[in-house]
Image (spheres, coloured by chain):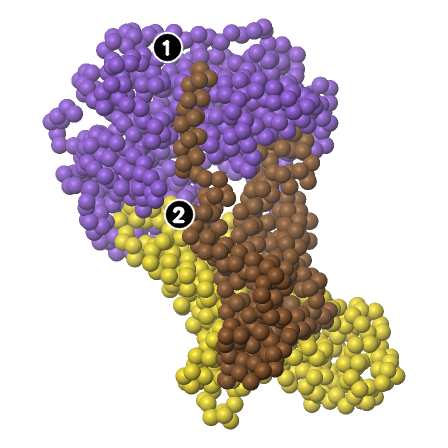
Amino acid sequence: MSVLTEQSGTEARAASAKIIKRRQWTRILRSRTAMIGLFIVTFWVLAALLAPILPLYSPTEQDVMAMADPTPSATHWLGTDILGRDQLSRLIFGARTVLMVAPLSVAVAMIVGITMGMLAGYYGGWIDAVISRFSDVILAFPVLVLYVILIANIGPSIINIVIATTIASAPGIGRITRGLVLGLKHQEYIAAARLRGESTLFIMLVELLPNCRSMLIVDACLRIGYTIITIGILGFLGLGLPPPNPDWGGMVKESTTVLNVWPLMSLVPSFAIVSLVLGFNLLADGLREAWKP
Amino acid sequence: MATFLAKRLAMMLVTMVAASFLVFAVCEFTPGSVARKSLGPFATQEQVDLLTQKLKADDPLLVRYGRWAGVLLGIIPDPLQDPSTGLNFTDPRGARYFGNFGYSTLNKLPVNDVIWDRLGNTAILGGLAFLLIVPLSIIFGVLSGLKEGGILDRSLSVVSITFTSIPEFASGVFLVTLFVILWPLLPGTSPLDTGSGWSIPSQLVLPVAVLVIYDFGYVARMIRVSMIGVMEKPYIRTAVLKGMSTRQVVLGHALRNAMIAPFTVLLLQINFLISGVVVTELVFAYPGFGRLLLDASLFGDIATIEAATLITVAIAVTTQFIGDLGYMLLDPRIRLR
Amino acid sequence: MTAAPIAPLLEVRDLRIEYRGKMETIVAVPKLSFSVRPGESYGLVGESGCGKSTTAMAIMRYLGSTGVIAGGSIRLEGRELVGATQRQLRAIRGRRIAMVYQDPMGALNPVKTIGAQLNEVPMLHLGSTRAEATEMAAAMLKDVRLPDAGDMLKRYPHQLSGGQQQRVVIAMALLGRPSLLLLDEPTTGLDVTVEAAVIDLIAELRRRYRTSLLFISHNLGLIAESCDRVGIMYSGEMVEEAPTRNLFGKPRHPYTQGLIDCIPDIASGKHTRTLAAIPGHIPLPGERPPGCLFGPRCRDFRAGICDSLPEIPLTAAGKDHLVRCGRWREIDRARTTLPLQMSGAVSPAGTIEISDVGKLYHIGHRRTVTANEGVTFAAGRAEIVALVGESGCGKSTLARIVTGLDRATSGEIRMAGENIAELAASQRPRHMLQSIQMIFQNPDSTLNPSHSAGFSIRRSLKKFGLRKGRDAVEQRMRELLEMVRLSPDFAARKPDQLSGGQKQRIAIARAFAIDPSLIVADEPVSALDVSVQAAVVTLLLDIQASRHTTMLFISHDLALVRHVADKVVVMYLGRIMEKGTVDEIFGDTTHPYTEALISAIRSTNPDETSRTRIMLTGETPSPVNVPPGCRFASRCHRKLGAICDTVPPPVQLVSDTHEIACHIPIEDLQVPAKIVSPAPKVREPS
């Protein structure tokens, strides 16, 4: 059996592999849904990043003149809120807060949740029992109740929102990770790693985690979307970041008082939230389709 | 079977105890808070300290929790209702009975006078929404799962992803704008009294719509995914190659398998519909359970918070239990060895 | 095609099957023609990717959303199936043509009772009421030799064993009284003895119901003994078709000959024969060469004849014998195969000694699974000891204990003076880990899909400090890849770019990379195609011989074991039934279980005396709460009596190396007639 024969055959195989299967990241390009989602998200990220240098009104400055008629005009493209503050700039500056807090919270929750899930799934036994029971208790709380109780007691601030998100989301992430690990830990390459004497940490981080990557990334996108909604809800309930921080949820809340007169005032921040969350949801859905085996 | 039930019931109890303890710990961490909240913000520090001593509220956390549990179970009378505290908290049912959740400092009424009505209101809202969500999501989920990539499937995906991106307050605002301000067909608030001239059913339309919009898409997609998974299974091929028509295959073979996983998902929606609807209640000024919890949290009405949490967790744990039971009944692989 | 005097039952003509994706169209089957005559059993044979399963699905008109019949015709009893309406197809499926599937567990609906699923067929096609259908179902269950029909009807599929499930699938297929039964790898995945029983059942049912069979398999021996006519497929084409005797007695096509030469037989071992591998690989649909598809791999390829024509046509090579070869007349069939160079004698000094090893699992209360009990044997330097048995015999568990993936509950395993039986891999010292390595069964999960193929080899080299520095490691990697005959750039490829055989070679390179003294190979080639198996086995034997590595070779395939092993240990339900040298095991005096296993081996050699198959009754009992006495007693065809159920059998010494655990005295265990034919004759050129 000549080496050359094997090689020539595999060249063809590799070539067709390149045609038929693209690498993970380029597969995204083929999914229209993912591209639309990515576009929306990028738009907001850019807006948030560039906010300080864009020619915007200050989000806290009140234009007393506009308070009489806060509808959109040439001076205020999206109108103003009831205190005369420019909606457009409040939206964009609000995006900064949201796009900082939501991904950060989810990132921290991911780290905690993945650790929990890895430990529970790989070791099994009493570790799994303890972690799963603990997760069950937290998951028994409807999410919003958890947030409300936590924030009402420890006060709204970025750190507290991160903590609340971590507590609320980590068990769910842990459960997903645990499920993935349970399916993977009996694969033969894990046994091969054990026979090499690899440490458990190595097996978890290098052998198992990369194979969970796609599902966890999709889940992360969905969670970011959900966290943005939650931050909006907290703002709406009055538990958001204290004023004068532009908080999309708070913006909606303030403008519901004049809903029957100037409905647009509430619709504008609502639409902002919907578009950003939609972006993340589309991205997650597109990624899931693209990475399906 | 009996041992399974017993074990699960025990687990449920443990979960409830653990959850209520956690909430207790978070709320009552600072001992002075109970007295402070009971007396109001204008009381002097001496009065607060005196009451704290009387209530033995500087005891360790576990002891206080035990006391609360004791009051709830009707073993101990509620210390807050002791006339010697001078607080004037009276409960027509007495100070010591099973199910005594204590006294609501916010509403100046026993918790039991407040909480059950509100829970009932939310149950009406949630119940109506559930009755709509179940058939809608099953029908759309199954039909779109049958033809993956078909027109129905793609439209469902678009609709569903969009709807789950709209938080309740946004859809509430939007619907109110549409049906109250632009076309005044429906009331803008739902306080559940006919004083404003709107009938009770008409007051329920918009809040229920908001709930259905937000939830239906998610559940329908879950069912769709399950259906797609089932249709790819080899036993569907067996059924088709036996000569069965599509209708026979779907109804006779696919449906039952496809509904096993979504069954739990559907039940979990009950949790959401009871406890997660605070936003909708706020938008429509609906006198419901979620608003009660929110107001109590903001005010610091600890007894109500703890009561509401316990009820919420109890509902959650019960639905989980029913879900597991249903799983066992639906899937013979779990039921029989 | 030669004109058949009787109208064929199934006639496939010029069939073309394409898969139309969004990006490209793949032609799975370019142009296929064959027919099945009434009452005959036709075998369709080929390796993976040859299109046989696709053809079966096309006949049933169930190709999925991307599969399309792009041309040709399929006629069943004169009726055209291509282009038939759904309504017409529904009338035919299950009634005129029925299917038996590869995975019986998956083919049955887990939430419906057996009875409900069986009833559907007569209720649908024969207009029966439920009561009538239930009666028919019960009668059919008896026909497929399932006991206690009434109880069986109420059970669910997961409560049945694999063999029982397959019988239910067969019953379901026959309930419609079809004229043609399509069997797609019906026994792959079943134990050897269960397979034998199912094949025997199919043959009997075929006679009784006068059903024609289209039998699809990759197992040549099985086809050789079950079918009247055979068609060999290669890359979507039929390359040879003939009555069974003629095809296997005088194969005309080089591929057929190559396949036959790949298969180990029970009369010769590695010292007398090398499994002749076919170089190269099966062309993917997009890379089919012009002319003869097998050309690039054919020893007798001649440019000009074999690659010039747009296609090589099927020509008659004898009565009812078609072959697609441009040179079939000229090709010299005599093949010389070189035996292996055996360097040096095998040292009897024990490399590893396993004494009385046991493994118990406790599940629930009062339930114990006995995976292993009292396992004792030894292996010397450069020796290959084969562990043979069916599912549940404990061979895989033992492998895991030896390597440290599991721990024994009792007994000793001595290696280099240390007892490792109760040491898990993480507790073993490094030199111990280095001396025992493993080759796994499933090539798809043996390499981490997120890393390159060479990743695990590099890790091994680094962890055991065999090479320091990047250049030294890469150099060693190149050497290892060359050893398994892969070019060096394979190290950088991802596993999804490799074929099963290539992945298994990487696994072999990985196992040998750190120079272990013992390698445990757990079914290393079971998941590979026949021709790839031969190549990998030959490679493995080469490397093992040159490095004097001891090997524990686990397999359920006795013919392969015959070829590969020096010593054999036969296990059943956790205990050793027999152990000895390979000649002794395959010799006259054997344990009844070994006898049954050997009799189940099928051969393609038509000159072999038709053997009486030993049918074992019942199913393998579960390893939970094992009975006292002989584990094999419940199925033994030579059971003495009550003593077998109650008293554990004594270990009888037939020779220094040969032991049998049985109550039957040794003299009585001698196999009466030779069921194994002598070494194969040299085939005459024709």
The answer to whether residue A62 is visible is yes
Mark 1, secondary structure of its residue: loop
Instruction: Return the residue at label 1.
Output: C680
Query: Which part of the image, by quadrant, shows the N terminus of chain C?
Result: top left
Q: Which residue is drawn at 45% across and 39% down?
A: A22
Q: Nearer the viewer, residue C16 or C397?
A: C16
Give, as a three-letter code, the residue at label 2. Lys
Q: In this view, does B247 lie above or below C636?
A: below
**Chain given the colour purple:** C
**In this view, which residue lies farthest toward the left?**
C5
Residue found at x 60% / y 76% = A85
Q: What colour is chain A?
A: brown
Instruction: Residue at 19%, 42% (x, y): give it.
Output: C81
Judging by colour alone, the chain drawn in yellow in this rendered image is B
Quarter of the picture holding the C terminus of chain C = top left
The reply, left or right, for residue B80 in relation to residue C79 is: right
Q: Which residue is drawn at 57% across and 11% down?
A: C546
